[in-house]
Image (tube, rainbow, N blue to C red):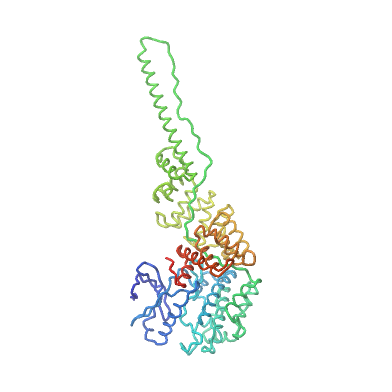
């Protein structure tokens, strides 16, 4: 049955569990939300109802960029609902099923965020009690968020939600199994250790062939987790310490756990976000050769004959006709020369980015038999981007197709872009790939970038990070700034290639030096986080963040806000921090929006 909750509409079921169903819904303005609805048969069960209310009360008070935000709570005699932010992506349980074990660098980077969030939770006085991969959500932007505080406990609370052990058997601590009423925050540290083990191995910590949860619980209380082959000794040691059977021997806080993961002898990692949602630039080609202008006609010779009185009339007629033909031919030739001249001038103006005059000249001569393939492409580009004329995707596509048929490779690429993003046509990734491949074969490096994008994101093809990496490499080596940034990101994240901070910094540097905002942001992050030089270099980080911020790079603006708020490389300056946060939030950065909301500031 479709829920009925005031002010929400367009409900679609996202998933369901034993006690609740999660629905997609939109408010009156069309903003998406996730709504967790307690099952009807659970509404009359006092302890479950109390637990559900407790989850809502607890989560609405949590405001951290790595914790799923609860917006509101609704209850009537038949309905209990928690209204949450809507997240696009997938939980890590499903991610492991799809992709298997996660590279060490990526896992450590994610865990840095998770442990920061859990430090915040513990300082608030809460224990999660159900940390596991399926309660950790990887957003489409590459951010990790902790979910589902349904069985969280308030430290020192007199409220007893349960008399028995609660949690997911595979990830429970020994004390959750043996003495569930006396647990403290160290039970979360144990579950975090087991979760990290699962991420690095791609499998559950205990054999699924066990026939009962009792057998698994026996393993939990007695047997340590095995060391993981191929994982650094520092990370293995951290997992062993976090999952000690005696809680006194574990890390005593999430800060300690995080420090151990980032020891110098562990594999370096980083934390650069993946938000490349902008349409790649459509770049016009440059030509150095023009077709030669050849004369089309020669004046016919005029022959002279001896005077013969009887033939004067005929001779005069012939002379007159010849003169008319010569004059007419001269006018035609003059007109054709003007057409050619205007077309060539239009192409030159286009290359100088004087689009209005270029468009006027090329449009005027659009029907000329002397319109060159380059001029056809230029008309397509100006219609495509609205440069010098009104944007018109239909006209753009027609001119690109004409130029493409004449062998203009950049028109092939730009047609691919139109089908990739659905600009004036239905999205068609297969057709886009075909155009990109044709353009790449002709040496267009931007087409290699676009092919890398398709394979990295699985658009019309299976995700293939190896092919994506190779395509980006081809374009990056030709100096394409966006490809250099993507290569840096792949090295930073360990996507399709072994994690390498030095390679990441090198490619970010190449991209940044070309003025590419995302490359500047990435380079700033690497310096600020200490992955460029081995120590935090806030001054260099601020320099690159400011360059990116000048181009309205929202993440750079957000980090500048962080630096001024907490005094990283600068004196603490809340007024400046607030200014950066607001600008970042207005550009759509969710982290900045959450910070401002948490402090009670409006960013709209």
Q: Is residue 240 left or right of residue 287?
A: right
Nearest the eye: 229 or 285: 285
Q: Quadrant of the N terminus?
A: bottom left
Q: Tell me the residue at 57%/69% (across/down).
A: 567
- Judge by depth and name the residue closer to the eye, 94 or 56: 56
Q: Nearer the viewer, residue 568 or 323?
A: 568
Residue extending farthest top? 309
Q: Quadrant of the C terminus?
A: bottom left
Residue 438 in the image: x percent, y percent?
50, 51
The answer to whether 481 appears left or right of 58 in the picture is right
Q: Position of residue 473 (x, y in %)?
A: 58, 56
Q: Is residue 48 above or below residue 107?
A: below
Residue 429: % across, % down: 45, 58
**Is residue 212 visible in the rendered structure shown here?**
no
Q: Is residue 598 above or below residue 401?
A: below
Q: How many numbered callouts?
A: 0
Q: Is residue 152 above or below residue 476?
A: below
Residue 145, horizontal then vertical, whole percent:
50, 73
Q: Is residue 26 among what the camera can see? A: yes
Query: In screen coordinates, is 78 left or right of 466?
Result: left
């Amino acid at each position: 049955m479709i829920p009925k909750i005031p002010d929400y509409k367009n409900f679609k079921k996202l998933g369901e569990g034993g006690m609740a169903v999660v629905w997609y819904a939109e408010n009156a303005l069309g903003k998406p939300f996730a709504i967790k609805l307690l099952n009807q048969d659970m509404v009359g069960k006092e302890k479950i109802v109390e637990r559900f209310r407790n989850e809502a009360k607890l989560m609405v008070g949590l405001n951290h960029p790595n914790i799923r935000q609860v917006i509101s709570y609704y209850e009537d005699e038949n309905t209990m609902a928690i209204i949450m932010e809507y997240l696009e992506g997938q939980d890590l349980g499903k991610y492991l099923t799809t992709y298997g074990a996660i590279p060490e660098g990526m896992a450590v980077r994610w865990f840095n965020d998770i442990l920061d969030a859990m430090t915040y939770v513990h300082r608030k006085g809460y224990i999660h009690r159900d940390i596991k991969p399926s309660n950790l959500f990887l957003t489409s932007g590459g951010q990790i968020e902790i979910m589902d505080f349904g069985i969280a406990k308030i430290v020192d609370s007199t409220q007893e939600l349960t008399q028995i052990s609660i949690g997911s058997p595979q990830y429970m601590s020994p004390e959750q199994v043996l003495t569930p009423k006396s647990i403290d925050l160290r039970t979360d540290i144990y579950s975090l250790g087991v979760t990290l083990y699962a991420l690095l191995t791609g499998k559950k910590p205990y054999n699924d062939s066990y026939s009962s949860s009792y057998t698994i619980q026996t393993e939990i209380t007695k047997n340590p987790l095995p060391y993981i082959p191929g994982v650094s000794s520092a990370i293995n040691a951290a997992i062993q310490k976090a999952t000690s059977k005696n809680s006194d021997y574990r890390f005593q806080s999430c800060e300690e756990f995080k420090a151990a993961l980032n020891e110098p002898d562990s594999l370096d990692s980083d934390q650069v976000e993946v938000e490349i949602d902008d349409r790649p630039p459509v770049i016009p080609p440059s030509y150095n050769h023009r077709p030669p202008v050849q004369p089309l006609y020669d004046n016919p010779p005029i022959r002279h004959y001896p005077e013969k009185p009887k033939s004067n009339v005929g001779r005069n007629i012939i002379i007159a006709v010849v003169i008319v033909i010569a004059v007419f031919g001269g006018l035609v030739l003059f007109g054709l020369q003007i057409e050619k001249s205007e077309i060539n001038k239009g192409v030159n103006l286009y290359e100088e980015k004087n689009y209005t005059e270029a468009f006027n000249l090329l449009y005027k001569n659009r029907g000329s038999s002397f319109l060159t393939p380059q001029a056809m492409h230029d008309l397509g580009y100006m219609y495509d981007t609205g440069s010098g004329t009104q944007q018109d995707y239909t006209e753009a596509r027609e001119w690109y197709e004409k130029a493409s048929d004449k062998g203009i490779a950049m028109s092939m690429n730009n047609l691919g872009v139109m089908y990739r993003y659905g600009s004036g046509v239905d999205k068609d990734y297969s057709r886009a790939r075909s155009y990109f491949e044709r353009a790449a074969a002709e040496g267009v490096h931007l087409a290699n970038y676009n092919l890398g994008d398709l394979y990295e994101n699985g658009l019309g093809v299976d995700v293939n990070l190896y092919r994506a990496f190779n395509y980006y490499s081809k374009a990056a080596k030709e100096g394409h700034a966006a490809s250099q940034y993507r290569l840096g990101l792949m090295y930073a994240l360990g996507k399709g290639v072994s994690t390498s901070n030095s390679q990441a910094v090198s490619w970010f540097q190449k991209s940044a030096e070309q003025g590419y905002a995302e490359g500047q942001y990435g380079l700033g992050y690497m310096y600020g986080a200490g992955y460029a030089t081995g120590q935090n270099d806030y001054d260099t980080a601020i320099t690159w963040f400011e360059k990116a911020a000048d181009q309205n790079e929202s993440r750079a603006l957000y980090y500048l806000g962080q630096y001024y708020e907490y005094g990283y490389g600068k004196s603490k300056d809340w007024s400046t921090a607030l200014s950066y946060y607001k600008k970042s939030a207005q550009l759509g950065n969710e982290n900045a929006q959450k910070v401002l909301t948490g402090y009670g500031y409006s960013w709209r």
